[in-house]
Image (spheres, rainbow, N blue to C red):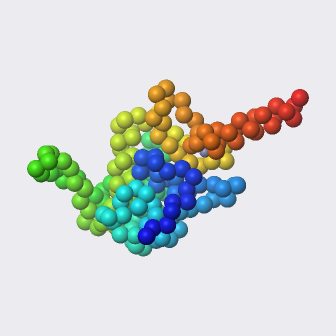
Amino acid sequence: MTATDPRPLTGEPVSLDLLNTRWNVEGVRQDLLTDVDGLAVWLATNGLEDRFAADAGTLRHTLTARDALGALVDAPGDPAATARVDAVLGHGRIRATLTAEGPGEKAEFADPSWGPGWTAARDYLDLLRTAPDRIRACAHEACILHFFDTSRNGTRRWCSMAVCGNRAKASRHYARTKES
Ligand SMILES: [Zn+2]
């Protein structure tokens, strides 16, 4: 049985969910991926636990993918960051398939320990194709979470209205009260 996912934000596309394995609590950095137990939680949250093992090699390569994606999100289009994500993508390939259910695709890996990291990098390509301007960092200065803005008008600013949205509102209110 897998432990519960302790993170404040889950449910984002898997590429951003990988970045969201790091978050801040009262200014202190938390990290779900410090050991294979945390990796097991992350794999389960993303429905990857049956396909990939939570072991040391997978953890190392998943962290490589996280660093690469984190660098690219911070500096979109940066050649070095782009090359790092591309290098992760080089560890897997897509085989076209045909089954009784119809045409499909299947990911293949020479080394399956790259599977989860590759899956996250591949997901990022989908976001780039869909709406790169909707890949966002939470607007709260103390927050390091990321999300894909699927709101109709594209106006989402916070990882969570309940947490960061209200914190920002409260500090604006506090600033106003102090001035008057
Ligand atoms: Zn936030």
Give the residue drawn at x 74%, y 38%.
170
**Which image quarter has ligand 1?**
top right
In the rendered picture of this protein, how many numbered marks are placed on residues?
0
Viewer-nearest residue: 145 or 8: 8
Give the residue drawn at x 53%, y 68%.
34
Report x, y in % for residue 63. 46, 62
- Lateral position of residue 67 relative to residue 90, left or right: right
Which quarter of the rendered picture does the C terminus lie within?
A: top right
Quick check: 16 above or below 161?
A: below
Which quarter of the rendered picture does the N terminus lie within?
A: bottom left
Give the residue drawn at x 63%, y 59%.
29
- Lateral position of residue 59 relative to residue 101, left or right: right
Report x, y in % for residue 115. 33, 61
Viewer-nearest residue: 87 or 24: 24
Which residue of the protein is positioned furthest toward the front in this rendering?
A: 1
Give the residue drawn at x 54%, y 30%.
155
Report x, y in % for residue 129. 35, 37
- Lateral position of residue 164 relative to residue 118, left or right: right
Report x, y in % for residue 77. 44, 41
Q: Quadrant of residue 93?
A: bottom left
Which residue of the protein is positioned furthest toward the bottom in this rendering?
A: 56
Which residue of the protein is positioned furthest toward the top in this rendering?
A: 153
Quick check: 36 above or below 163?
A: below
Res 72 visible: no
Res 40 visible: yes
